[in-house]
Amino acid sequence: MDFELSEENRIFRTAIQDFAQKEIAPLVDEAEETHTFPVQLFKKLGEQGFLCPRYPVELGGGGGDKITECVMVEELNRVNPGIAAAVMAQSGLATQPIYRFGSEEQKEKFLIPAVKGEKIGAFGLTEPNVGSDAASIQTRAVRDGDSYVINGTKMFITNGPICDYVIVAAYTDPTKRGVGINLFIVEKGTPGFTVSRKLNKVGNRSAETGELVFEDCAVPAKNMIGEKEGGGFDQLSDTLISGRITYGARCTGTAQAAYDLTTQYAKERVQFGQPIVKFQNTRFKLAEMATHIDVMRTYTYQVARKYDQGKNVRKEAAMVKLFTADILQKILAQSMQIHGGYGYMMEYPIQRFWRDGRLYTVTEGTSEIQRLIIAKELGL
């Protein structure tokens, strides 16, 4: 199979690289120091069709494919994984369920403004006591006339503190494990919906993450995604499969940034009378890193293409996230080692990518969960 990017993808890569350097890079230091996301970027990205590049143009998107989205994610993560995380939440988790399963009214009210960057979205699945076992969520949604009353707490929610709406996973029928889950769109300002706290993270500091609480929060029944109670677990699975492919691009972009920084440092750092890049040990490490990055990128694009073709890639998507997230840890460790003591100093950007990338084997399905999915799909 030919994995060369299409002409459209190459043009898009150049455009998003230019945007990232001009519009995002100058904002990184302040965003990291203040632990805040520069919200003006949503609208700027939306105006260019960069925010949700694979949604149709008529919805405000870029009209691209899954590879286009992967290119966007890779390039943003090369600049700053925290800012990229907020954009990824918007372009995937917070919009795909509405795009794939939402009503026309929901698309008009929430999806189109989100694609254009006029509304910020979040996705609420994880809870304080529920992570990998998503079917064990405790949030409940009880029908009351023309509304559903939601009670529960969501944890580690990207964009939670700044969102205009959040898609919430809740049980409408807790007697049906997994099957009884539905997704609901809850708007900011709805009585009973509060951001209880903004979380202070080790890395990805420019992505705002929060704990969301729903106490007798009544939302219109028309805000339920889907036409009937039940079926939300399948909607979750569909969204997460797409997200795992996207994570391949996230890992690749972070790895590329680490490689670029490390190569530059190795050429400038002199020991024993010569740049350390001249030592075989350093060159071999860099060669191995470059090889891994090429494999990460190629496999991510391969699975993205299969996804666009409508093929079942549940196994392959899990493989993408497992492989790229785990290999990234090795690349980041080698990058830090080559930097030596300077890598541990806050003034050197490699430490930021090291801290940010550590999250990737945990979020959106741990590496252990990916192994379980792969084994199951292999019939083991």
Image (spheres, rainbow, N blue to C red):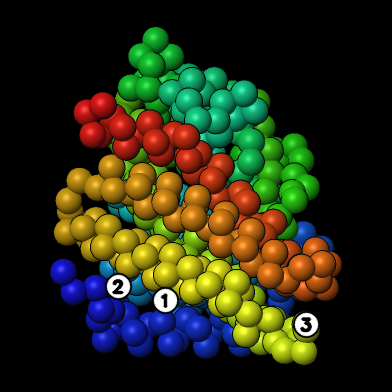
Distance between the Cα atoms at labels 2 and 1? 8 Å
Label 2 SS: loop
Q: Amino acid at mark 2?
A: Gly
Question: Is residue 330 toward the left or the right of residue 66 in the image?
Answer: right
**Residue 29, position as x, y percentages in the image:** 77, 73
* Residue beneath the point at 43% across and 14% down: 174
**Residue 198, position as x, y percentages in the image:** 75, 45
Q: Please say whether residue 50 is visible from this viewpoint.
A: yes
Q: Amino acid at mark 1?
A: Gly
Identify the mark at residue 271; answer none if there is no mark: 3
* Circles 2 and 3 in contact, beta carbons < 8 Å: no
Label 1 SS: loop
Question: Is residue 332 toward the left or the right of residue 380 in the image?
Answer: right
The foreground one among 20 and 325 is: 325
The foreground one among 305 and 257 is: 257
**Residue 186, position as x, y percentages in the image:** 53, 40
Report the mark closest to the observer, 2 or 3.
3
Q: Residue 86 is drawn in which quadrant? A: bottom right
Sequence-wise, the earlier of marks 2 and 1 is: 1
The foreground one among 257 and 21 is: 257
The residue under label 2 is: 63
**Residue 274, position as x, y percentages in the image:** 72, 89
* Residue beneath the point at 53% across and 58% down: 328
